[in-house]
Image: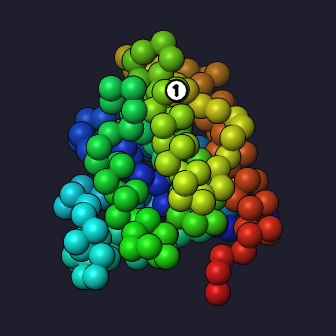
Amino acid sequence: MAKHKVGYLIGSLAKGSINRKLAKALVKLAPPELEMKEIHFKDLPLYSYDYDANFPSAALEFKKAIASVQAVLFVTPEYNRSIPGGLKNAIDWASRPYGKNSFSRKPCAVIGTSPGAIATAVAQQSLRSVLSFCNAPQMNSPEAYIQFTPGLVTDDGEVTVESTETFLRNYMQEFHMFIARVLQVLPPDA
């Protein structure tokens, strides 16, 4: 199967984020055909259409990073039953100015972890709604709502529960196959 460059966005800006740990695990468990690269967005100012005529350099670099990958993986926590403001701001930057939406036709997947019993289910639905508007094809199955327990994933991304490791490895394999299917039907614009 073909190799694909995948950018991943971690919704939490916290250095010790459990979603950062999950992202490290996903990178380790990804099939070798997926070249994983974190796309940072912490330096983006708050989006305003006043910038549309002259994007700041941080926003230009962010859009360039998204353009350099073939697919995007969102690893997000849930803040107040939605996605973190920083992540929403990043998506707003990437989808503007009008007619230059970086997510259009770009395969995406959504995953997240939280200590709560329903994990990030509500945040993921909120994010899926935004990505639908951005014309981003989304992997709908398998869904992945990971309840984080102490020690589930180590700081360096090792998953300590075998069944969770197997599930996450399968999730990344499914994402690889989803990317291949989407790009076959919707090749990137030339």
The answer, for residue 153, to whether it is visible in the render is no
Q: Where is residue 119 in the image (x, y as percent from the top left)?
A: 47, 22
Colour mapping used in the image: rainbow
Instruction: Decide: is 147 above or below 64.
Output: above
Looking at this view, is 60 or 48 the one in front?
48
Looking at this view, is 28 or 127 the one in front?
127
Q: What is the crowding at mark 1: few (fewer than 14 residues within 10 Å), some, or many (at least 20)?
A: many
Question: Residue visible at 40% across and 69% down?
Answer: 96
Q: Where is residue 93 in the image (x, y as percent from the top left)?
A: 35, 64
Instruction: Decide: is 153 above or below 156.
Output: above
- Extreme top residue here? 117
Q: Given the image, on which type of amino acid does mark 1 rest?
A: Ala
Instruction: Decide: is 57 above or below 14.
Output: below
Question: Residue visible at 44% across and 73% down?
Answer: 98
Left or right: residue 20 versus residue 50 is right
- Extreme bottom residue here? 190
Image quarter hosting the N terminus: bottom right
Looking at this view, is 16 or 100 the one in front?
100
Q: Is mark 1 on a helix, strand or loop?
A: helix
Q: Where is residue 134 in the image (x, y as percent from the top left)?
A: 53, 59
Q: Position of residue 150 (x, y in %)?
A: 37, 17
Question: Residue visible at 21% across and 58% down?
Answer: 46
Q: How many marks?
A: 1
Q: In which quarter of the image is residue 48?
A: bottom left
Left or right: residue 2 versus residue 97 is right
Disc 1 target residue: 121
Image quarter hosting the C terminus: bottom right
Left or right: residue 17 versus residue 184 is left
Instruction: Decide: is 113 above or below 36.
Output: above
The answer, for residue 56, to whether it is visible in the render is yes
Question: Residue visible at 22% across and 72% down?
Answer: 50
